[in-house]
Amino acid sequence: MLRFLSAQPTLNLWLIFLLENLAVTALALLFGWIILRLNHNAIKQPSRNEIGICLLTNVINTAITYAGFWLWQQGYIVMNFTINWFIVIDFVALFMLMDLAMFIFHYAIHHSVVYKAIHRFHHHYTDPTPIDLFVLHPIETVGFGSLWLITIASLSFNFYSVLIYLTVNVFFGIMGHLGIEPFPHSIRRVIPFRYLGTSTFHHNHHLNIHYNYGFYTTIWDKIFKTYKG
Ligand SMILES: [Zn+2]
Ligand SMILES: [Zn+2]
């Protein structure tokens, strides 16, 4: 796949990455809407503004994807393509590293002027809907994209772990913005779910911005006493 991409002219690459990002967004929204339907919840029609911002986020993410590919071609991002146990190990490392990095940034954003200027945009609804995962201020999208590229450029990860991580990232993002909780309390109480960022976990952050700054796990919020279950 990467050999095919390497043979493409720049314009084709931009087009392929744009289509890939749009396809991921469409699948993510479809997944979210299916869960809402299965739980007999009405699907709120996204506004024109939300659709516009969602498309803008996709364009920015296309640029991030292109930058990542360019950095890999230039040797700044080094990846391993071997199928072995490192797929699991590297995935866990990426999952935990990004969770900690995003917790720190998210906490810092809420405790600075950046919140009013940029991040408040994402908090426009206290009850999020799936499309809100992509309704972010452009600067925030660039910020998270840069954080991601710096993380994968600073260490060498397995390529398949990166793919799995990106899929899991979208899954958690959609689950956090369902606006409902599909899992009963009895399941959320048991390990490992009590340490994972459920729909309720991120929904509570939208309801009260002083809690739950983590994304994938509840660990950092529990350590820093900002957890609200
Ligand atoms: Zn926030
Ligand atoms: Zn959110």
Image (spheres, rainbow, N blue to C red):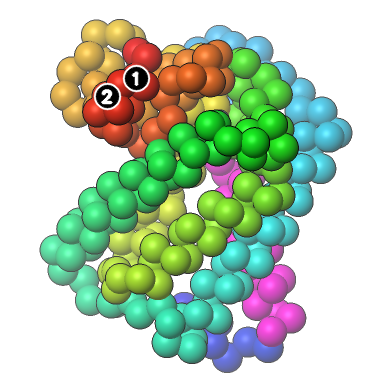
Q: Residue at x 63, y 47 (%)?
A: 140
**Disc 1 packing (10 Å; few <14; some 14–19; many ≥20):** some
- Direction from residue 178 to residue 152 in the image, left or right: left
Question: In the picture, which quadrant includes the C terminus?
Answer: top left
From what the image shows, is residue 191 above or below residue 14? above
Q: Which one is in front, 118 or 62?
A: 118
Q: Residue at x 35, y 44 (%)?
A: 99
Mark 2 is surrounded, within 10 Å at the Cα level, by few (under 14), some (14 to 19) or many (20 or more) other residues, namely some
Label 2, secondary structure: give it.
helix
The vertical placement of 26 against 158, above or below, is above
**Mark 1–mark 2 contact, CB under 8 Å?**
yes
Amino acid identity at mark 1? Tyr
Left/right placement of residue 5 relative to residue 101 reads right
Is 16 one of the magenta-colored residues? yes
The kind of secondary structure the magenta stretch mainly shows is helix
Q: Is residue 62 visible?
A: yes
Residue 215 in view, yes or no = no
Task: Identify the element where label 1 is drawn.
Answer: loop
Q: Which residues are magenta?
A: 10-28
Amino acid on which the number 2 mark rests in the picture: Lys
The residue tagged 2 is: 222
Q: Is mark 1 within 8 Å of ligand 1?
A: no
Q: Considering only vertical position in the picture, is 158 above or below 202?
A: below
Q: CA distance from mark 1 to mark 2?
A: 5 Å
Q: Residue at x 72, y 37 (%)?
A: 117
Name the residue nearer the viewer: 116 or 3: 116
Residue labelled with disc 1: 227
Q: Is residue 18 magenta?
A: yes
* Left or right of 209, for residue 168: left
